[in-house]
Amino acid sequence: MTMTSDSSHQVHDYSSSGPTAVSARSEATLALGRKLTRELSLDESVDTLGRWMAHYVAELIGEAEKANAEERSAKMQACSDAILKLWEHRHLLPNGKRPFEQLEPILRTLETLDPNDDTPRYFRLARASADEADKIGEESEAKFWLKLIDGLDYSARILIRYCLTQAAQTALDKSLEWVALAEAAGATDGVELPLIRIVGDESDLLKPSDPDEKARKQLEDRIDRLDGFTKLSTAFASELRQQIQQVQGAKGGS
């Protein structure tokens, strides 16, 4: 990975911002750079590229911090570009050094499981036809069952998302620290930042506390949907048991 600049990554022009904005954003970017260099230059690391990147960015940070007023803007620009370029390529960092490495399998799964996304995961065409029938007032048993599938789909997302949130707990605090640093530095590219926020929000929602009105309604809606899911599952399991009993009874009478 080269550290040369190109137009694909975020560049902050420190010369055109107000002094307060420059100070806040530049310090945030330096904080992100310092954490990256610490992670890449751990004593037990034997990765040559990782150590070189850590040394290079640390050197630029030192130059920016020591620069006089005349040179500081240019030094900070060069330092910021390098830090943000390194952050942009965080997925290519060595094993054990990627900021969200522990969450990567969870994030790949979570990306498709947002309960706020109404896009159905299964039988999309058939369910779209049911939606069209609903618009023109058609009633059918098939439409009833297709709408029931929508509810089951949502409930399944809630349950899977809960499991993923529990699985992410051990790595969540460290990941949220990375997210906070990146957001403060304006490095908000990439899908994992909002997904980690989703996991964090989900974790907060499930913590024992006094929820506000919005959170309470969200929890009540989930409870209602999960209760419906449980009732349908129980009814289906009961029907299957009856089928087994009928088969066993037929065999016993033969």
Image (cartoon, rainbow, N blue to C red):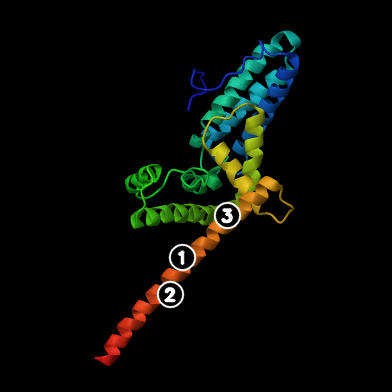
| Amino acid type at image mark 3 | Arg
Return the residue found at the far bottom: 253
| Dot 2 amino acid type | Ser
Cα distance, mark 3 to mark 2? Answer: 24 Å
Element carrying mark 2? helix
Find disc 3 in the rendering and name its residue: 222
The kind of secondary structure element at disc 1 is: helix
Q: Residues within 10 Å of mark 1 (few under 14, many from 20)?
A: some
Where residue 196 appears, as percent x and y from the top left, is: 58, 42
Q: Which residue is mark 2?
A: 238
Position in image of residue 222 (x %, y %): 57, 54
Please tell me which residue is depicted at 75% across the width and 18% down the height of the picture.
Answer: 20
- Image point (43%, 74%), residue name: 238
Give the quadrant of the C terminus: bottom left
**Of pointers 1 and 2, the one earlier in the residue sequence:** 1
Task: Give how far across and how far down residue 119 sits, in percent.
Answer: 43, 43
As drawn, the label of residue 232 is 1
In this view, 207 is above or below 36:
below
Q: Callout 3: helix, strand or loop?
A: helix
Q: Give amino acid for label 1.
A: Leu
